Image (cartoon, rainbow, N blue to C red):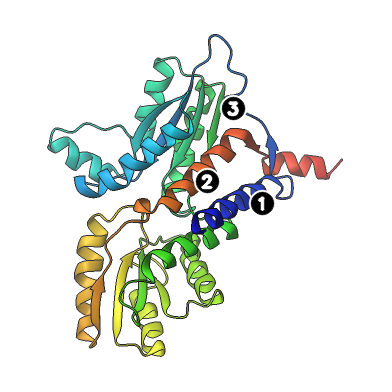
C-alpha cells in the first residue's frame, strides 16, 4: 500500500511540473537521436570520502538510473574539489562536471541530461548550472534535472519518506533533521521543510543546518518548546559522510547532551531511501521529456 501511495505521489509531482504555468514545453531530448547522435546521462554528486556511504547512495542511484534508462550510458562527476583532492591523494581519480562534459564531447556525445543529487537549489546547484551553461554550445541539447526539493510536491514526498523511515525508531523522541545549509537565500528551503513537517502534523520533527538557517540555536529552541527529553539526530543530506559523522554525531550530539537530552543517532543519508532515489529518477525523466522556457522568452510572449 505504501508503495502505491509513493508511486501516485511521484506521478502527481511530475504532472504538476508539466502543467506549471507554461514553464516547460514537451520536448524529448533522447526521442529523436539521429544516426550520428549519442545520448548520455551525467550523474553529478557532491561526493564523499567514505566508501561505505558511497556504496549505499551514489552507486545505488547510478545503478537505478541505468535501470530507468537502459538504452543510455550513465556517467558520473563529483563537484566537491576538496573531496576530489583527497581522493586524488589516495590514488582515486574522479572528474568534476567541467572535465566530465569535455570528455563527453570528445567521445562524440551530442545529447546530455545532467541529473545532480543536490538537495536544494543552493550554491552547489547554481555553480553546476553555470558550468553546464559554459559548455552547452558544444552539444546539440543539454538538459538539467532539478534537485531533490524543488516543488511543494517534492517536499511532501520526501517528508512522507523520512517520517515513515524514522517514526518506528525511538518512539516518543523528537527528531532533529540536520541539513548542510547555505549562505544564500535558498537556505529558506530548510525552513520550508520544517514548516511543512509541522503543517502535516509532525510537531516532534524539527530541522536545523550546519552552515545556514535554521541554526543549531533555532533548532534547540524548537526542541525546548516541545519538551521531550529524547532526541534522534539524522542527516537531511544525500550521504551520511563527513558532516554526519563529525558535525551531527559529534558537535551537535555533544551540545544536546550538555543540555540534558538523551541523544540517539540515525546516520543514514537520504540517498539510502528508495523513495528519494525514485524522486531523483522522476526529475530526470521529466527533464528528458521537457525543456524549460526561459523568462526572456515568456516576457517576449507576454508583450505580443
Q: Secondary structure at mark 3?
A: loop
Q: Quadrant of residue 213?
A: bottom left
Q: Secondary structure at mark 1?
A: helix
Total labels drawn: 3
The single residue placed furthest to the right in the displayed view is 304
Q: Which residue is mark 2?
A: 146
How far apart are the two marked residues, 2 and 1, measured between alpha carbons? 14 Å
265 in relation to 289, above or below: below
Residue 176 tag number: none
Which class describes the residues within 10 Å of circle 2: few (<14), some (14-19), or many (20+)?
A: many
Counting residues from the N terminus, which is met first, the one under dot 2 or under dot 1?
A: 1
Counting residues from the N terminus, which is met first, the one under dot 2 or under dot 3?
A: 3
Q: Where does the image place residue 13, in percent across and percent down from the top left?
A: 61, 52
Which class describes the residues within 10 Å of circle 1: few (<14), some (14-19), or many (20+)?
A: some
Q: Which residue is mark 1?
A: 16
Q: Which residue is mark 3?
A: 29
Answer yes or no: is residue 145 visible. no
16 in relation to 163, above or below: above
| Circles 2 and 3: CB atoms closer than 8 Å | no
Q: Nearer the viewer, residue 44 or 153?
A: 153
How far apart are the two marked residues, 2 and 3, measured between alpha carbons? 16 Å
Q: Nearer the viewer, residue 161 or 114?
A: 161
Residue at 55% in and 38% down: 285
Residue at 45% in and 30% down: 41
Q: Where does the image place residue 223, in percent across and percent down from the top left?
A: 37, 83
Q: Where does the image place residue 283, in percent across and percent down from the top left?
A: 53, 44
Q: Where does the image place residue 273, in percent across and percent down from the top left?
A: 38, 54
Which class describes the residues within 10 Å of circle 3: few (<14), some (14-19), or many (20+)?
A: many
Residue at 54% in and 62% down: 156
Q: Quadrant of residue 178?
A: bottom left
Q: Closer to the camera: disc 2 or disc 1?
A: 1
Amino acid at each position: 500500500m505504501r508503495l502505491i501511495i509513493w508511486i501516485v505521489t511521484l506521478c502527481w509531482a511530475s504532472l504538476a511540473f508539466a502543467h506549471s504555468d507554461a514553464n516547460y514545453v514537451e520536448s524529448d531530448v533522447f526521442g529523436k537521436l539521429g544516426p550520428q547522435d549519442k545520448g548520455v546521462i551525467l550523474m553529478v554528486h557532491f561526493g564523499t570520502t567514505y566508501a561505505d556511504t558511497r556504496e549505499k547512495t551514489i552507486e545505488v542511484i547510478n545503478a537505478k538510473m541505468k535501470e530507468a534508462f537502459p538504452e543510455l550510458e550513465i556517467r558520473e562527476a563529483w563537484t566537491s574539489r576538496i573531496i576530489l583532492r583527497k581522493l586524488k591523494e589516495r590514488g582515486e581519480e574522479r572528474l568534476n562536471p567541467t572535465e566530465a562534459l569535455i570528455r563527453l564531447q570528445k567521445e562524440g556525445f551530442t545529447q546530455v541530461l545532467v541529473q545532480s543529487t543536490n538537495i536544494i537549489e543552493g550554491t552547489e546547484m547554481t555553480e553546476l548550472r553555470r558550468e553546464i551553461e559554459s559548455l552547452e554550445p558544444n552539444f546539440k541539447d543539454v538538459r538539467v534535472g532539478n534537485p531533490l526539493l524543488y516543488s511543494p510536491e517534492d517536499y511532501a514526498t520526501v517528508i512522507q519518506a523520512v517520517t515513515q523511515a524514522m517514526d518506528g525508531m525511538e518512539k516518543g523522541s523528537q527528531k532533529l533533521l540536520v541539513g548542510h545549509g547555505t549562505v544564500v537565500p535558498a537556505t529558506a528551503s530548510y525552513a520550508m521543510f520544517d514548516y511543512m513537517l509541522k503543517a502535516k502534523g509532525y510537531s516532534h520533527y524539527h530541522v536545523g543546518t550546519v552552515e545556514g538557517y535554521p541554526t543549531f540555536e533555532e533548532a534547540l529552541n524548537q526542541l525546548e518548546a516541545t519538551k521531550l527529553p529524547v532526541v534522534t539526530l539524522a542527516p537531511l543530506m544525500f550521504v551520511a559522510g563527513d558532516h554526519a559523522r563529525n558535525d551531527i554525531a559529534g558537535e551537535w550530539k555533544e551540545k544536546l547532551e550538555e543540555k540534558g537530552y538523551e541523544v540517539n543517532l540515525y546516520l543514514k543519508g537520504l540517498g539510502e531511501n528508495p523513495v528519494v532515489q525514485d524522486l531523483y529518477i522522476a526529475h530526470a525523466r521529466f527533464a528528458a521529456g521537457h525543456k524549460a522556457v526561459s523568462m526572456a522568452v515568456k516576457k517576449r510572449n507576454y508583450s505580443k
